[in-house]
Amino acid sequence: MSAAPNRRMVAVILLIPVVVILALWAFAWPAARIAPHDLPVGVAGSAPAADRLQQRFEQREGAFEVHRYASAADARRAIEDRSIYGAVVATPQGPQLLTASAASPVVAQLLHEAVTAQAPEGAQVQVEDVVAAPAGDPRGSALGASFLPLAIAGVLSGSAVTMLRLRGGRAALALIGVATLVGIGAAALTDNWLGVITGDWWAEAGTLGLTVLAIGGTVAGLAALIGPPGVGLGALLMVLLGNPFSGVTSAPELLPRPIGTIGQLMPPGAGGSLLRSVAFFDGSDAGSALLTLTLWAALGLTAVLIGGRRRARRPAAPAPGTPEPALAG
């Protein structure tokens, strides 16, 4: 047996378990370590009752980032602007909890349990869901599950462009066309049929399409610059790391540090945050996520165009058996 097949066999035996272990770590570790990390919440009302509520949050060092508001109305506006996930209001009847299950059902449940546990014995905690999750997806499970197919769609589009040897402008147009159709189809499915998202339809379709374009452009761009291994590297970044680090199924602030921050700098995480903003919060706090997706898409398409020009300039290899040109003597 020659050395080359032996090396390939050893590479398969070692590489696949490494990828599987990496995937298990990336998906299982964040899920097993969910806890609040500087989770932005609000406290409203007058002292000293509001001061006591704030102190209870601050007892868990590093868990909550507490913002003070003069009234319940101010806290509601902050929730609608996506500045905080929820707020506790000190009232004469006892604490009132304001939540936003549309921002994260997991956080809404966490805050409910925390405030109920800290309330005086026998006190009834009033709960108001300021921005409620849609009736078609009250637990946010369908929304969270939708981003893995989007990541796969992006990887497939980048892989197809590479395997079909599309170059330069044709490759870019193919990626944009795929992203546009996927965005329209995904919006029709999740909004019109399932009722998972309920915002402006075209903004939702644009967000879904831009997410696919950012992922597909990155995969195709890496392949254009470094060759076929770029497809594997892009898939590793987007599916095995970007998806579990996105926080779409919980919240970025519930993931271990610095996973939540890293996830928001990648297309799946930025896409999830942007979709929540346009679907439930009228576009509030959408700027940073939109910028992140746009940068990934622009860099990926630029790499595709640069890689296409480099290959176009590269001289073709002579066919086997073609005689070499004679040197001028």
Image (cartoon, grey):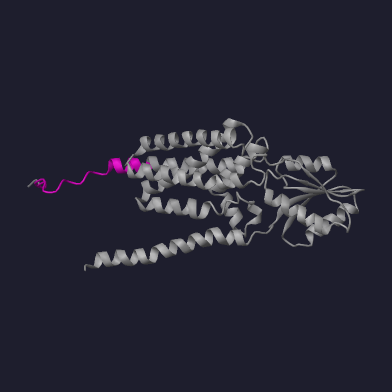
318 over 29 or under it: above or below:
above
Q: Which residue is drawn at 68% across and 51% down?
A: 106
Image position of 235 (left or right of 227): right
Q: Is residue 311 magenta?
A: yes
Answer yes or no: is residue 156 visible.
Answer: yes
**Is 204 positioned to the left or the right of 51 in the image?**
left
User: In the depicted view, which residue is nearer to us: 218 or 112?
Assistant: 112
Quadrant, the N terminus: bottom left
Residue at image point 79% right, 62% down: 59
Q: What stretch is highlighted in magenta?
A: 306-326
Residue 47 is a magenta residue: no
The answer to whether residue 109 is left or right of residue 259 is right
Residue 203 seen in the figure: no
Vertical comparison of 67 with 59: above or below = above
Horizontally, residue 52 falls left or right of residue 294, namely right
- In the image, 98 versus 231, the foreground residue is 98
Looking at the picture, tell me which residue is in the foreground, 242 or 201. 201
Q: Position of residue 21 (x, y in %)?
A: 48, 64
| Residue 5 position in % (x across, y down) | 26, 64
* Residue drawn at (66%, 56%) of the image: 254
- Number of marks in the image? 0
Judged by its main secondary structure, the magenta piece is: loop
